[in-house]
Amino acid sequence: MIVADTGALIALFDRSDRHHEAIRRLYDDNPTGGCCRGPSCPRSTTSPPRTSDSGPRTLAGGPLVGRVHCRVGPAEDLAAAERLCRRYKSLRIGLVDGVVAAVAERLRASAIATLDLKHFGAITIKGRPRLLPRDA
């Protein structure tokens, strides 16, 4: 499983982003998809996320339907993120980055899709997920 950070998701959907091709290849090479924490999911004005009572939110339309999911995790994710932010206070890690790291730990993700190497490259995340596309 790949947990996605906001910057990677923006690059995935924005064809003009300089990282678009690298991030798109990650998703093309991982057909089982990725997961991202709710607050970091991009909102599209033309294609809002669909919601169902039985599962995660799935971005509607396009080739990524069913492959990118926004999951709202347990409250423990927020508590774990706050602890991580305190532990690495000098790095000024934002709460969303902390939640991404917490979700990666909880789900035992094999990788985090991120362009934010300043933060994710400097912290220790349980399970030592790869940072993609850097570690591809």
Image (cartoon, rainbow, N blue to C red):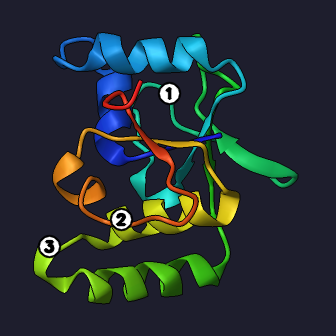
Disc 2/disc 1 C-alpha distance (Å)? 23 Å
Q: Secondary structure at mark 1?
A: loop
On screen, residue 15 above or below 13:
above
Lateral position of residue 128 relative to residue 96, left or right: right
The mark nearer the N terminus, 3 or 1, is 1
Whether residues under marks 3 and 1 lie with C-beta atoms below 8 angstroms apart, the answer is: no
Q: In the rendered structure, which amino acid carries the disc numbered 2?
A: Val
Q: Residue at x 65, y 67 (%)?
A: 73
Q: Residue at x 29, y 89 (%)?
A: 86
Q: Quadrant of residue 39?
A: bottom left
Estimate how packed mark 3 is, as few (under 14), some (14 to 19) or many (20 or more) residues with alpha carbons within 10 Å: few
Disc 3/disc 1 C-alpha distance (Å)? 35 Å
On screen, residue 83 above or below 19:
below
**Image location (x, y in percent) of residue 64:** 59, 19
Q: Which residue does the numbered mark 2 point to in the structure image? A: 96
Estimate how packed mark 2 is, as few (under 14), some (14 to 19) or many (20 or more) residues with alpha carbons within 10 Å: some
Disc 2/disc 3 C-alpha distance (Å)? 14 Å
Closer to the observer: label 2 or label 3? 3
The single residue placed furthest to the right in the displayed view is: 54
**Image location (x, y in percent) of residue 29:** 58, 13
- Numbered circle sitting on residue 91: 3
* Residue 6 shows in this picture: yes
Q: Residue at x 43, y 25 (%)?
A: 46
Q: Which residue does the numbered mark 1 point to in the structure image? A: 47
**Image location (x, y in percent) of residue 37:** 52, 56
**Image location (x, y in percent) of residue 111:** 52, 42
The mark nearer the N terminus, 2 or 3, is 3
The mark nearer the N terminus, 2 or 1, is 1
Q: In the rendered structure, which amino acid carries the disc numbered 3?
A: Leu
Q: Quadrant of residue 1?
A: top right
Q: Quadrant of the C terminus?
A: top left
